[in-house]
């Protein structure tokens, strides 16, 4: 939906935030401190950039903050690395200044989960 209409429905970031909230009690990592920093740092930074320069949508801010809370600051850093590289390439190839960030966050998330899954298989096997 972000790619076609440039809209991120509220249910997406709310669902991710709720999953992160439940996993606080089920998983020892990331810690609540890492989750809180992962929530606040990108949320505040992107909000500041949106207010000062524009170009960052509110849905992108909320989605990134929810991902930061769910996966912690370090997990979010990996997701953003694998999301922003293709996003920059997309912007350069299409010569667009505005990029549907949720699409690329999904790519980064998919790569991050794949890495965790493969590491889990290697450790278990």
Image (spheres, rainbow, N blue to C red):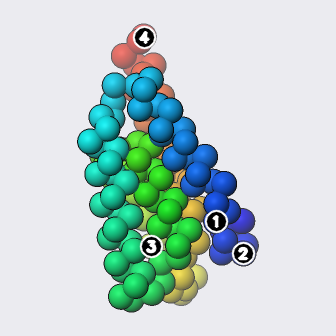
Residue 50, placed above or below residue 116: below
Residue 84 shows in the view: yes
Image position of 16 (left or right of 73): right
Between discs 1 and 4, the one toward the N terminus: 1
**Element type where label 4 sits in the image:** loop
Between discs 3 and 1, the one toward the N terminus: 1
Task: Please rate how many residues cluster around mark 2, counting C-alpha atoms within 10 Å: few if below 14, some from 14 to 19, many from 20.
Answer: few
- Alpha-carbon span between mark 1 and mark 2: 9 Å
Q: Nearer the viewer, residue 71 or 58?
A: 58
- Residue drawn at the location 56% of the way across and 68% of the way down: 59
Quadrant location of residue 2? Answer: bottom right
Q: Position of residue 53 (x, y in %)?
A: 39, 89
Residue 97, placed above or below residue 86: below
Between discs 2 and 4, the one toward the N terminus: 2
**Element type where label 2 sits in the image:** helix
- Alpha-carbon span between mark 3 and mark 4: 37 Å
- Alpha-carbon span between mark 3 and mark 1: 20 Å
Query: Which numbered disc covers residue 26?
Result: none
Q: Nearer the viewer, residue 83 or 17?
A: 17
Image position of 10 (left or right of 65): right
- Residue drawn at the location 36% of the way across and 88% of the way down: 52
The residue carrying mark 4 is 125
Between discs 3 and 2, the one toward the N terminus: 2
| Pair 3/1: label in front | 1
- Residue drawn at the location 34% of the way across and 68% of the way down: 44
Query: Which numbered disc covers residue 8?
Result: 1
Q: Nearer the viewer, residue 98 or 14?
A: 14
Q: Nearer the viewer, residue 5 or 62?
A: 62
> Pointer 2 and pointer 4: residues touching (CB < 8 Å)?
no
Q: Position of residue 84 (x, y in %)?
A: 42, 64
The residue carrying mark 3 is 88
Q: Position of residue 65 (x, y in %)?
A: 43, 57
């Amino acid at each position: 939906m972000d790619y076609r209409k440039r809209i991120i429905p509220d249910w997406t970031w709310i669902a991710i935030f709720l999953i992160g909230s439940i996993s606080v009690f089920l998983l020892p990592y990331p810690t609540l401190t890492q989750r809180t920093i992962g929530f606040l740092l990108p949320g505040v930074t992107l909000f500041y950039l949106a207010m000062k320069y524009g170009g960052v949508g509110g849905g992108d801010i909320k989605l990134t903050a929810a991902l930061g809370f769910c996966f912690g600051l370090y997990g979010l850093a990996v997701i953003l690395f694998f999301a922003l590289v293709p996003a920059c390439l997309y912007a350069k190839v299409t010569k667009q200044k505005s990029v549907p960030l949720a699409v690329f966050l999904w790519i980064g998330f998919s790569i991050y989960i794949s890495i965790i899954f493969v590491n889990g298989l290697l450790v278990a096997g």
